[in-house]
Amino acid sequence: MEQTNQTPQSVEMTELEQALTAENEKLIAQVEELTAQNENLTKTVARLQSSADKSDTYLTQLVAMKNDFESYKRRMKFNGDQAKAEGVASVVTKLIDICDNFELASKHLDGDNLKAFQMIQQQFMQTLASFGVLPMDVSGKDFDCLTMEALSQMDCGEENKGKVVQVYKNGYLMGDKVLRYAQVIVGA
């Protein structure tokens, strides 16, 4: 029989070395397993980050589309309001000519006919006023080329120089917009 010259201390070292080697192998296996799990988690994080980036991109696009749509709605409302105002102004401009005819006709009537006619004319003017259309009051005022059209000049004394001395046709405003310029004769 072969005897080994091992002392109890060396036997203990060998068992300790074996235990440490076994423990070391377990730890290496755990490290490899954790490394594999870490790689899987890294890939999952990368996929999640990619999805989050896509979500952010979609959210940004959605917010931009919402803002564009809100802007579109405001623009359409403005365009609709503007088209309505232009339509009203177009119709009212044609009705203003009827006002001129009322004024001419009232010069040729008298008595009860004139009163009835003036009532109709007043009702017509109130209807125009309900649309925001008002006649300009320019008689005796300084000439303003932004609201008046000078047909001629008339010598009416120094105190009337540059002032409206006669109104040929009334001018009309709708808000701040001139629908028809007042046609006037200006003092020279």
Image (cartoon, rainbow, N blue to C red):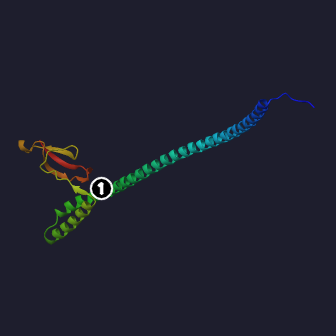
Q: Is residue 16 visible?
A: yes
Residue occupying the far right of the picture: 1
Other residues around mark 1 within 10 Å, as few (<14) / some (14–19) / many (≥20): some
Q: Left or right of 162: which side holds 126?
A: right
Between 42 and 32, the one nearer to me in the picture: 32
Quadrant of the snapshot with the C terminus: top left
Residue occupying the far bottom of the picture: 112
Q: Residue drawn at (44%, 50%), measured in percent from left and top? A: 72
Between 9 and 127, the one nearer to me in the picture: 9
Q: Quadrant of residue 21?
A: top right
Quadrant of the snapshot with the N terminus: top right
Q: Is residue 5 above or below residue 155?
A: above
The x and y percentages for residue 26 are: 73, 38
Q: Residue drawn at (20%, 63%), measured in percent from left and top? A: 105
Q: Residue drawn at (21%, 65%), measured in percent from left and top? A: 121
The amino acid pointed to by label 1 is Thr
Between 153 and 177, the one nearer to me in the picture: 177
Q: Is residue 157 visible?
A: no
The x and y percentages for residue 140 are: 11, 49
Q: Left or right of 156: which side holds 179?
A: right
How many numbered dots are placed on residues in this image? 1
Label 1 sits on residue: 93
The x and y percentages for residue 46 are: 62, 40
The x and y percentages for residue 24 are: 72, 35
Between 136 and 161, the one nearer to me in the picture: 136
Q: Left or right of 70: which side holds 158?
A: left
Secondary structure category for the residue under label 1: helix
Q: Residue drawn at (78%, 29%), measured in percent from left and top? A: 10
